[in-house]
Structure formats: C-alpha cells, structure tokens
Amino acid sequence: MRVPIVAGNWKMYKSAQEAADFITALLPKLTPLEGVERVVCPAYIALPAVSTALQGTPIKVGAQNVHWKTEGAFTSDVSAPMLKGLVEYVIVGHSEVRQYHGDTDARVNERAKAALAHGLKPIIAVGETVDTYRAGGTEAYVGAQIRACFEGIPQEALANIVVAYEPIWAIGTGLTPTVEEANTIIKKAIRDVLAELYGADAAQQMRIQYGGSVKPDNMKAFMQQPDIDGALVGGASLKVDDFVTLVTLAQEAKR
Ligand code: PGA
C-alpha cells in the first residue's frame, strides 16, 4: 500500500514571515490528517523559519530545487549539504525551472542524484508541452523523460524518490487532462517504464503524484484513480483551507 503524498509548491510566494504565519494557521488543521504524507515547499529564504516551526510535527518540508554540486562558484545556487537538516524533500525538474533556467533531463538527473547522495528525497517532476499533448505524443515523451531522469539511479534509492506528473499546459492554467488521461500516463509512461527499469515490484511501490491545477473541486476525482498517489499543488497550496481540503480528500480517497 503506497502512502499518499500531497506537497505544496509555494513557488516565489510568501516571505519568511508570511510563511511562518501561514504555518501557524495551517498546523493545527493539518496535523490530525494522518495517513497522508504532508509536505510544504517554501522558497529558500523561508526554509529556516518553516523548518523550525515544523520541527517535531508530522508536516515535512521540501525545497524547490537543489544544485548538483556540493559547493563552488555558483552564484545564487544552493547545494544539497546546505539543505540537509532543513528539508526532507526537494523538487527537481519542475517545468518552470526547465523553462526559465534551462534545465534538461540530464540536469534533472544530476540534481536528483545530488539530493540522494546527501540523504534528501527528490520529487522528480516530468510533463509534456501542449503541442506534444495535442499531437498525441505524451506517453512517448514522458516515458523518455523518466528514462533520462532515472539514468544511473540504483534500485535501492527508489524508496526515497517521488515522481510528479505535471503536464506543463495544466500548471497554473485551470486546465487539466481528464483524470483517466492522467492515470493512463502515470501508469503507462511512468509506472510501466519504471517496471522495465527496476522490476514490477519496485515500480508498484513508487509514489507518483499528479500536478497541474489541482483544486478542492477536482482533487477527489484525481485521488480516486488507482495509479495517482497524491498531488503536487501550486496555487491551491497557498491558502490554508484549500490545502487542508486537498489533504482531507486524499485521505478519504486512499483510505
Ligand atoms: P498549480 O501548480 O497547482 O498552480 O497548477 C502546480 C505546480 O506547479 O506544481
């Protein structure tokens, strides 16, 4: 049985103070919702405040990216050893990082390996453009992303990895694939490809999230799909009650 995981990607929202205030409001509502792994991913600047506020609670913290090197002349970047102790998870390969910072699958693979090498758990994000979607190329495209992003990652590491399927055209747009389409891609392009690479048992245990315009009114339907193990949420994770509702819906659907 895979434990569902709902992660809030706060993107470039909330100062350290706003993040701390948000946690104060969120914590009492989110704490009782057992059976779902709950993660918040603030901007780097807010990580120390959020990490301190969540110490000793069941709510976990994630970063939004990590550099592939341990240290060096990389102005503006943050390495895995720097994040260690502050976060348990780190998102790699988010489409906004791919788009605005030029990340390729090879780079995402390097970032994931760096995270793993320092005991952090990568949430590896993949997903197709609208053109690929319209052309019917999603399955092949996402399958190739998975192969490239997992290159050289050993099977022992899989328990510490989460995959997020996020169609680029669904992020922040209010558009989504149908829940059946999302489940099919997650099954065929992600779980089945992981089964080819690591064996059926390992693939069966992998947690795979859907992301892209997840809201309280569509969450239940996504969570009722058998291969969707949670959600990576942007906009709706910025509001306390919406995020609590999303986690509640995941809890109910996966009970
Ligand atoms: P959204 O973002 O929920 O606002 O569409 C999802 C994401 O970027 O992870």
Image: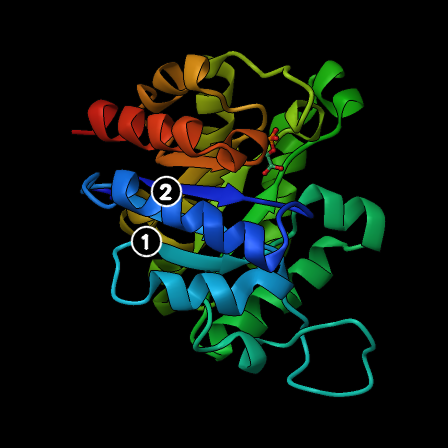
Circle 1 residue: 59
Give the SS element for disc 1: loop
- Label 1 or label 2, whichever lies nearer to me, is 2
Residue in front for this viewpoint, 141 or 215: 215
Q: Are marks 1 and 2 in contact (CB under 8 Å)?
A: yes
Residue in front for this viewpoint, 214 or 26: 26
User: Residue at left 63%, top 16%?
Assistant: 174
Real-space CA distance between mark 1 and mark 2, rounded to the nearest whole angstrom: 10 Å
| Residue 8 image position (x, y, % from top left) | 49, 42
Residue type, label 2: Leu
Q: Which mark is residue 26?
A: 2
Q: Is 220 on the left or on the right of 171, as rendered? A: left
Q: Which mark is residue 182?
A: none
User: Residue at left 55%, top 44%?
Assistant: 9
Place residue 34 in its image quadrant. Answer: top left
| Depicted 74 relative to depicted 149: above or below | below
Residue in front for this viewpoint, 60 or 207: 60
User: Residue at left 64%, top 35%?
Assistant: 127
Residue type, label 1: Ile
